[in-house]
Amino acid sequence: MTDCLFCDIVAGDVPATKVLETDRALAFRDIAPHAPVHVVVIPKQHFVDTHDIAHADPELLGEVLRAATDVAVQEGLTGGYRILTNTGPDSGQTVFHVHVHVLGGKNLGALAG
Ligand code: 5GP
Ligand code: ZN
């Protein structure tokens, strides 16, 4: 076990329902879904947040985003979906291993302010 929950999921030390995996990215269902489809997509390598990965390895950030769109196709989100990422405490980020949320399966309405 590490001090990072998502690193522990990558290592298989914490169980998760995986929906997609590439060499460098992993997608699994959120434990507390906010929509009928709510999947979390992460790089397997640890980065704290979007700023961290965007500067250290922008190609990997692109791979995570591509995986997120592939999850949406796989989940049948033909009507559209939302990809969002929280960065820092004011955003509501609670797990400090960068991740994007893929939300869909219903009309999501306006982005909450
Ligand atoms: P954040 O709030 O940092 O943007 O998103 C973290 C997400 O991780 C939350 O939506 C939360 O429900 C999810 N989460 C927290 N702990 C676990 C867990 O143990 N397993 C899974 N699958 N998701 C988790
Ligand atoms: Zn981590």
Image: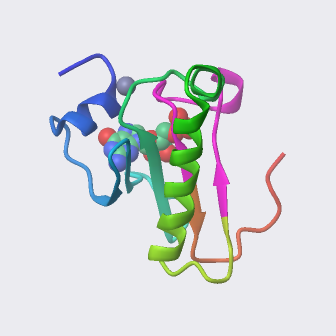
In reply to whether residue 97 is colored magenta, the answer given is: yes
Q: Residue sitting at 20 percent across and 38 percent down? A: 14
- From the viewer's perspective, tell me whether residue 64 is left or right of residue 5: right
Image: 91 above or below 23: above
- Of residues 73 and 35, the one nearer the viewer is 73
Dominant secondary structure of the residues highlighted in magenta in the image:
loop
Where in the image, quadrant-wise, is ligand 1 located? top left
* Part of the protein shown in magenta: 82-101
Q: Quadrant of the N terminus?
A: top left
| Quadrant of residue 105 within the rendered picture | bottom right
Tell me if 35 is positioned left or right of 74 in this view.
right
Q: How far from the left and from the top, in percent, is residue 104?
A: 59, 69
Find residue 38 and report its horizontal and vertical position in percent: 49, 61
How many labels were placed on the picture? 0
Residue sticking out furthest to the front: 59
As drawn, 110 above or below 9: below
Q: Is residue 5 visible?
A: yes
Q: Does residue 34 appear anywhere in the picture?
A: no
Image point (34%, 33%), residue name:
6
